Amino acid sequence: MKEYAYFPGCSLEKIAISYHLSALETTNQLGVKLTELEDWNCCGATAYFHVDELLAYTLSARNLAMAEKIGPEVVAPCSACYKNMYFTNKHLQDDPDLADHINDALHEDDLSYSGKMIVKHLLEVFANDIGPDAIKSKVVSPLSGVKVAAYYGCQILRPRKDHEDVEQPQFFEALMAATGASPVDYPLKMTCCGGSLLLSSRPAAYGMIHNLLHEAERVEADVIATACPLCQVNLECYQQQINQEYGTHFSIPVVYFTQLIGLALGIPAKKLGFGKEFLSPMKAIEEIKNMHNQQEAIAQ
Amino acid sequence: MADKPTFTSEVANLLLAAEGNPLSTCIQCGTCSGSCPAAPYMEQTPRRIIAMINAGFKDDVLKTNTFWYCASCYQCTVRCPSGIDIAEAMYALKRYTMWKNQYKEGLIGPTFSETFVKTIIRSGRSYEPLLAPTYIFSYGVREFFNEALNATNLMLKGRIPILPPRIKRLANFRRMIAHIIPLGGIE
């Protein structure tokens, strides 16, 4: 069983608890072990970088140091945590003075960091390390007929890490196709959800969220799959406000990709954190699966 | 005696840690503004801000909302044909106005960030209810009630903790932070 150090991040403790539960359930089913860091702290989000870069790097360095005790690879399910950890790691590798300075601070907590970790996003672990084929072979309850908008968001792909396709990636769609679902062509799949502007510059964020929902409706997505807690909260929990603001009638469920994969693997919905969302996709998913199965029966 | 640094060079110095090319290499193509999902809400678009910095219009740059409306999506950064890390420049301008206490009045971003940082120093982890007062009164009565309703629903669904989380080795954590920045008034 392959083991990764696992840094859930603050959102997954509560507001995105269904992401946490479904990540652990699905990886376990797929033969991957996520071992949580013993005393992780906040990654600094964007706010720390508004105030002080060095402090922000120190926060991520502490998590990296704890991860190193578990194994050579660390995985973050939140895009912001991932981006911060990835670039802190890179800066520490590139700049020995910075690494020395931060290691001095880490000694206050009896930690030190060698700079040798590999940082991955959970979506990458599923798409590259586990792979769609391995997932497909374990699907017992395919999501046939379900139209999924695979929504990448920003920071998984940007800023560019090394080799990834930042304009036309397809790995998320491939992952969704492995569950038996039909990924739709969703042109805004990498356009920002507004992130923390929802709190600090709300009208701008509402405009951005509205565009994404409008586009999801236009391409007739039954559900939006996300890989980031902030995207999930912005797109789902504020749909009523968007409807109020724009006179629209959006009702598009937004779930974590691990929840959809979990359903296809036959894991009970409750164990995947379903029931904690504002707009449940379960009814839609069951209806579509039934309809699809009927159509297949007729065709035969 | 050496000359006082210009605003252009001040911003350039703030960006020394970033890997992109200097703002002076900007060709004013507008790819950044065209790619930016927040540009319609900015008083000056990213392309114009870069032109204004290069022309030394310090006061005009500092009094726009532009960089506080950057959501850090990095679309501009990955597309810039001159290889300028524009999102990082927006961060640099945020920090510049925070340090100098010169940000545009009425913005929520600076207070929000400051409260966020203090929350983390206090407990090691983020806690949404402590951040709410920085913005909840700012968007009118309807939004206030919407936000309260949302928070209640989240709490009923078990998605907001009742008590703020905190890390175990908090004393060590704070010493670690004090090693980087003398905490002064915060402690």
Image: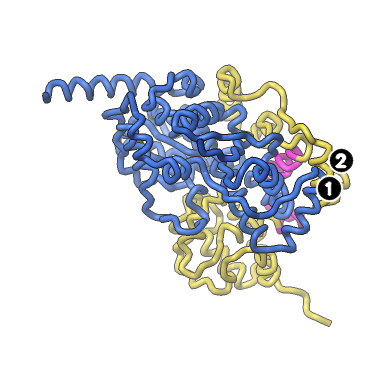
Horizontal side of A12 relative to A95 (left or right) equals: left
Label 2 belongs to which residue? B187
Label 1 belongs to which residue? B178
Name the foreground residue: B109 vs A2. Answer: A2
User: Which hue is chain A drawn in?
Assistant: blue
Q: Position of residue A269 (x, y in %)?
A: 44, 20
Instruction: Say if A30 sits above or below B10 in the image.
Output: above
| Amino acid found under the numbered disc labelled 1 | Ala
Q: Residue at x 55, y 58 (%)?
A: B44
Q: Is residue A265 visible?
A: yes
The answer to which of marks 1 and 2 sits earlier in the sequence is: 1
The kind of secondary structure element at disc 2 is loop
Instruction: Say if A40 sits above or below B62 in the image.
Output: above
Name the foreground residue: A122 vs B40. Answer: A122
The colour scheme used here is: by chain
Task: Tell me if mark 1 has few (under 14), some (14-19) or many (20+) residues whose alpha carbon lies within 10 angstroms of its own.
Answer: some
Is the magenta region chiefly helix, strand or loop? helix
Chain identifier for the yellow-coloured part of the image:
B
Based on the picture, tell me whether residue B62 belongs to the magenta stretch.
no
The kind of secondary structure element at disc 1 is helix
Q: Residue at x 62, y 24 (%)?
A: B160
Magenta-colored span:
B96-120
Q: Chain of mark 2?
A: B
Q: Quadrant of residue A224?
A: top left
Q: Residue at x 50, y 40 (%)?
A: A122
